[in-house]
Image (cartoon, helix red, strand yellow):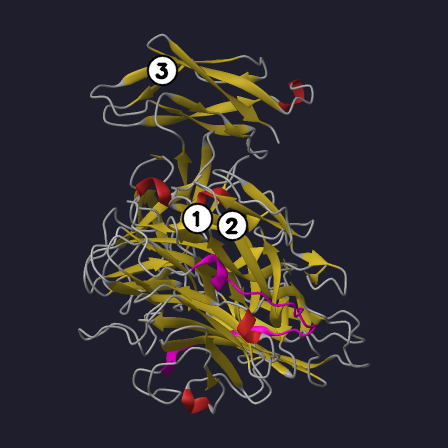
C-alpha cells in the first residue's frame, strides 16, 4: 500500500465561511450516446475575470453566469469547431462568501444545480472539469453566492476526429517526494521557483491525481510538458496553475497533461516549499479503442439521502461500492464502460482524511488518494476511475466519517465500429521509403476508400519476409472518425543480410488486403555494437535506486549512439522498473551510465533481464530484485541448456570471501556443493542443472543454502 497522506499531515483549522454540505448541488440529466477521443493542448488561459480575458473584467456576482467561448481557429490555441467536450482547470479566486461554482454546456436548464467547485470565503481553489460543449462552442460558469473572480485554463478537448483514446489503469503511485518514489525523484521538497522533471512514459497525455502537501507558504503548482509555450523558462514562472494551496494545506486536483516526446512531465512550485504526490489513473494513446461519451452531470451517489447507497456516512477505513453502469434509461454509464468521469465531493467531514476511488477489486486502491479534505470542510475533485468488470467502483475513506457525493459527467466506452459504411476498406498502403538500413525509422501511410465511421476504423498488421521471418507486432492502428488516412512509424530491428518484408494490413469486414514491401539492409559489420551492460549492483530491493552502465565496442559516432532499453521477468513474478526507453552514448565516448529505480516488487525474489539494443547488437544482463537478508533464488530452467541461473545473497557484503553450502532435495537437480561469495560482494550466481527426463513431470524442485547455521530454500522451476 502507498503512503497515506493523512498520517503525515498536520490538522488544519477550518476557515471561517467554509463551504457547507448544502453547497453540493444535484442534477438528473443522463449520459448521452456519443463517442469522442481526446487531443491534449498546450495549456492556454481562456478566462480570467480579474483582467478581462474571455469575459468582461470584474467579479461574478451571486446567481450570475459567465458565458465562455472555448472553440476557435487553429491559431487561437483553443479547441476546434465541432469539439464535443473540453477539459478546463477552473479556479475560484477570493470569494466574498462560501459558494459553489457550476460549469455546464450553455443552454442546460438545470446546470446551476450541480457543483463543479466548492470554495470558502477568501480561498483560492482549483478543480479540473470535463464539460460538454454547446453547439455554439460555449460553456457557462455559474457562481451561487457572494462575488468571486473566475479563471479557466484549457488543457485539451474531445472530438470525433481526435486520435487519443483512453486507457484506464488501476491507480498507481508514480511520484512522492516524501518517500522518493519515481525515477530519480529525491526525498526532498520542491523549493520556491523549483521544478521536478519526472519520466512517466510516452503516451500522448497522462491522467494524474496530483496532491500538494507539507506547504510552507501560499503557492501554486503547475504541471506541464517541457515543450509547452507556457512553461517555466528564462526565470519566468508558468503562465497557468493546476493547484492553489495555502500554508499547512493539503489540496488534490486531477491533471490531464500533455507529455514530452521522451515521456517526461515537469512539476513547478511557485513559492515556499512543498511535497508532491501523484497517482496515475490512465493515459491517452492512439492505439486504444476507448471513446468518451460526454453528458450533462447526473447525481449517482449521495450518502446524505441514500442516492446510490445507504443514507449513512462512510466511517474510518470504510469502503462504499458504487454501481456506475446500467441498462439504457437508468441514467448510468452504459454496460461495458471502461472508465467513468465523476465530480467527487466530500462533506460533513469529522477528521482530516483522504478518499480513494478505484475499480472494485483493485488491491492498491486505498494506497492512493483521489481527494484530501480537513475536518469541517467541503471539497470536490475531478476523478477518472477505471470500472470493474461488474460495472462498479469502490470509494475508501481513511479516517473519521464523511458523506460522499458523486456526479457522473461522462464515460469511456469501447468504440462503436459496427456502423462502417458498406464497402469501406483499405484503398492503399505504402512506406515513405523503399529501402532502409536496419534500425532506421520509417513511416507507413494507409488510406481508406472513404472516411472512417464514428469510433474510428481499425487496421491490423502482420508481415512475412523473403527469409521466412514472420512479424505480428504493430497490432491495432486506428484511423480517427471522419479521416481517410493514417501515418504511423515502423521500426525494423537488426538483420544480418538483406531482407525484404511484405507487411499486410487487414481489417474486420474488409474484402481486400494490401501488402506494401520494404527492403531492410544490414549494417556495416564495423558498426558500433554493445560490449557490456552492467547494473551498479546485482541485487536490488523494492524502491531502490540504481544505475545501469552501457559500454560500446568503439567510441560513439559524432552526435551520439542511441541504445534502446528494455526489461522483463525471467520467471514467475512481476516487477515494475522505472527505466528510460532509450539512452544515448555521447559522441567520442565508449560508455554512458543512466539511473533507474525498482518501483514495485513482490515479496518473493524475482530475476529480471535488462536488455540493451543498438542497430546491430543486443546484450542482456541479470538483476535480482529481492528483500534484504540471506536469501536463495532458484529461477527458471532454460530448456536449451537444462540449467537455471540461481542466486544466493548475503544481505550485505562481507570483508572476506564467504562460502555458502548448497544442496538439493530433488535427486534430479544437481547444484555445486558450495558457492563462494567474493569479499565485498552481496552474493553470487551458480548453476542448477536439471535431468528433465528423471523429473517425473514435476513442475519444480527445492534447493537449499546454508550459512552460519541458517538455512534458506527456493524452487527451481521447469515451466
Q: Compare residues 527 and 184 and report the one nearer the observer.
A: 184
Q: Which residue is mark 2?
A: 403
Q: How far is mark 3 from mark 2, CA to CA? A: 58 Å
The residue at 34%/61% (across/down) is: 17
* Residue 635 x, y percent position in the rendering: 50, 29
Q: Compare residues 354 and 589 and report the one nearer the observer.
A: 354
Confirm whether residue 70 shows in the render. yes
Q: Which residue is mark 1?
A: 349
Confirm whether residue 439 shows in the render. no
Q: How far is mark 1 from mark 2, CA to CA? A: 7 Å
Q: Could you tell me if the residues under marks 1 and 2 are in contact, i.e. CB atoms within 8 Å?
A: yes
Which quadrant would residue 269 be assigned to in this image? Answer: bottom left
Earlier in the chain: of badge 3 and badge 2, it is: 2
User: What residue range appears in magenta?
Assistant: 20-48
Earlier in the chain: of badge 3 and badge 1, it is: 1
Quadrant assignment for the N terminus = top left
- Does 23 sit above or below residue 59? above
User: Which label sits in the foreground, 3 or 1?
Assistant: 1
The residue at 22%/19% (across/down) is: 656
Residue 27 tag number: none
| Disc 2 secondary structure class | strand
The residue at 50%/17% (across/down) is: 703
Whether residue 21 is in magenta: the answer is yes
Q: Which residue is mark 3?
A: 660
Does residue 548 appear left or right of residue 2 in this picture?
A: left
Earlier in the chain: of badge 1 and badge 2, it is: 1
* Residue 665 x, y percent position in the rendering: 54, 12
Q: Could you tell me if the residues under marks 3 and 1 are in contact, i.e. CB atoms within 8 Å?
A: no
Amino acid at each position: 500500500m502507498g503512503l497515506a497522506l493523512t498520517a503525515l499531515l498536520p490538522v488544519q483549522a477550518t476557515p471561517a465561511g467554509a463551504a457547507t454540505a448544502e453547497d453540493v448541488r444535484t442534477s438528473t440529466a443522463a449520459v448521452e450516446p456519443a463517442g469522442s477521443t481526446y487531443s491534449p493542448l498546450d495549456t492556454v488561459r481562456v478566462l480570467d475575470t480579474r483582467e478581462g480575458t474571455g469575459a468582461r473584467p470584474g467579479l461574478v456576482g451571486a446567481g450570475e453566469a459567465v458565458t465562455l467561448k472555448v472553440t476557435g481557429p487553429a491559431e487561437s490555441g483553443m479547441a476546434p469547431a465541432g469539439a464535443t467536450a473540453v477539459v478546463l482547470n477552473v479556479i475560484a479566486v477570493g470569494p466574498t462568501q462560501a459558494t459553489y461554482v457550476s460549469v455546464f454546456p450553455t443552454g442546460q436548464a438545470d446546470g446551476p444545480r450541480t457543483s463543479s467547485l466548492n470554495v470558502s470565503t477568501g480561498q483560492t481553489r482549483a478543480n479540473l472539469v470535463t464539460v460538454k460543449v454547446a453547439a455554439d462552442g460555449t460553456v457557462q460558469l455559474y457562481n451561487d453566492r457572494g462575488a468571486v473572480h473566475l479563471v479557466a485554463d484549457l488543457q485539451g478537448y474531445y472530438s470525433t476526429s481526435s486520435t487519443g483514446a483512453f486507457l484506464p489503469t488501476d491507480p498507481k503511485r508514480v511520484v512522492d517526494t516524501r518517500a522518493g518514489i519515481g525515477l530519480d525523484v529525491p526525498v526532498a521538497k520542491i523549493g520556491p521557483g523549483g521544478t521536478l522533471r519526472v519520466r512517466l512514459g510516452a503516451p500522448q497525455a497522462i491522467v494524474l491525481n496530483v496532491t500538494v502537501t507539507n506547504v510552507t507558504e501560499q503557492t501554486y503548482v503547475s504541471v506541464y510538458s517541457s515543450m509547452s509555450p507556457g512553461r517555466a523558462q528564462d526565470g519566468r514562472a508558468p503562465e497557468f496553475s493546476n493547484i492553489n494551496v495555502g500554508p499547512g494545506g493539503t489540496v488534490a486536483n486531477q491533471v490531464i497533461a500533455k507529455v514530452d516526446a521522451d515521456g517526461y512531465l515537469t512539476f513547478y512550485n511557485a513559492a515556499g516549499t512543498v511535497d508532491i504526490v501523484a497517482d496515475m489513473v490512465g493515459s491517452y494513446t492512439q492505439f486504444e479503442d476507448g471513446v468518451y461519451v460526454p453528458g450533462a452531470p447526473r447525481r449517482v451517489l449521495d450518502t446524505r439521502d441514500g442516492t446510490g447507497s445507504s443514507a449513512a456516512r462512510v466511517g474510518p477505513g470504510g469502503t462504499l461500492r458504487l454501481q456506475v453502469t446500467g441498462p439504457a434509461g437508468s441514467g448510468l454509464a452504459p454496460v461495458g464502460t471502461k472508465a467513468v468521469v465523476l465530480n467527487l465531493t466530500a462533506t460533513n467531514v469529522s477528521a482530516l482524511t483522504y478518499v480513494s476511488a478505484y475499480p472494485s477489486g483493485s488491491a492498491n486502491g486505498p494506497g492512493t488518494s483521489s481527494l484530501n479534505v480537513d475536518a469541517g470542510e467541503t471539497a470536490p475533485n475531478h476523478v477518472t476511475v477505471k470500472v470493474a468488470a461488474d460495472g462498479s467502483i469502490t470509494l475508501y475513506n481513511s479516517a473519521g466519517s464523511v458523506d460522499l457525493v458523486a456526479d457522473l459527467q461522462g464515460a469511456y466506452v469501447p468504440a462503436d465500429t459496427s456502423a462502417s459504411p458498406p464497402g469501406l476498406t483499405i484503398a492503399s498502403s505504402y512506406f515513405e521509403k523503399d529501402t532502409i538500413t536496419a534500425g532506421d525509422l520509417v513511416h507507413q501511410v494507409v488510406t481508406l476508400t472513404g472516411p472512417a465511421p464514428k469510433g474510428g476504423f481499425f487496421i491490423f498488421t502482420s508481415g512475412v519476409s523473403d527469409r521466412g521471418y514472420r512479424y505480428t507486432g504493430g497490432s491495432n492502428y486506428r484511423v480517427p472518425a471522419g479521416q481517410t488516412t493514417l501515418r504511423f512509424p515502423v521500426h525494423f530491428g537488426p538483420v544480418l543480410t538483406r531482407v525484404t518484408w511484405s507487411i499486410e494490413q487487414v481489417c474486420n469486414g474488409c474484402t481486400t488486403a494490401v501488402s506494401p514491401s520494404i527492403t531492410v539492409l544490414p549494417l556495416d559489420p564495423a558498426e558500433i555494437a554493445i560490449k557490456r551492460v552492467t547494473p551498479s549492483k546485482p541485487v536490488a530491493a523494492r524502491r531502490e535506486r540504481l544505475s545501469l552502465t552501457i559500454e560500446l565496442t568503439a567510441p560513439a559516432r559524432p552526435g551520439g549512439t542511441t541504445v534502446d532499453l528494455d526489461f522483463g521477468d525471467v520467471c514467475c513474478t512481476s516487477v515494475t522498473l522505472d527505466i528510460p526507453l532509450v539512452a544515448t552514448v555521447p559522441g567520442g565516448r565508449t560508455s554512458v551510465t543512466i539511473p533507474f529505480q525498482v518501483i514495485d516488487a513482490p515479496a518473493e525474489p524475482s530475476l529480471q533481464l535488462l536488455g540493451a539494443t543498438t542497430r546491430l547488437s543486443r546484450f542482456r544482463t541479470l538483476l535480482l530484485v529481492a528483500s534484504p537478508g540471506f536469501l536463495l533464488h532458484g529461477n527458471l530452467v532454460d530448456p536449451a541448456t537444462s540449467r537455471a541461473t540461481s542466486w544466493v545473497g548475503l544481505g550485505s557484503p562481507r570483508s572476506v570471501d564467504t562460502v555458502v553450502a548448497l544442496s538439493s532435495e530433488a535427486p534430479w537437480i544437481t547444484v555445486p556443493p558450495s558457492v563462494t561469495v567474493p569479499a565485498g560482494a552481496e552474493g553470487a550466481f551458480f548453476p542448477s542443472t536439471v535431468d528433465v527426463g528423471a523429473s517425473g513431470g514435476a513442475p519444480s524442485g527445492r534447493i537449499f543454502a546454508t550459512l552460519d547455521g541458517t538455512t534458506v530454500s527456493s524452487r527451481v522451476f521447469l515451466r
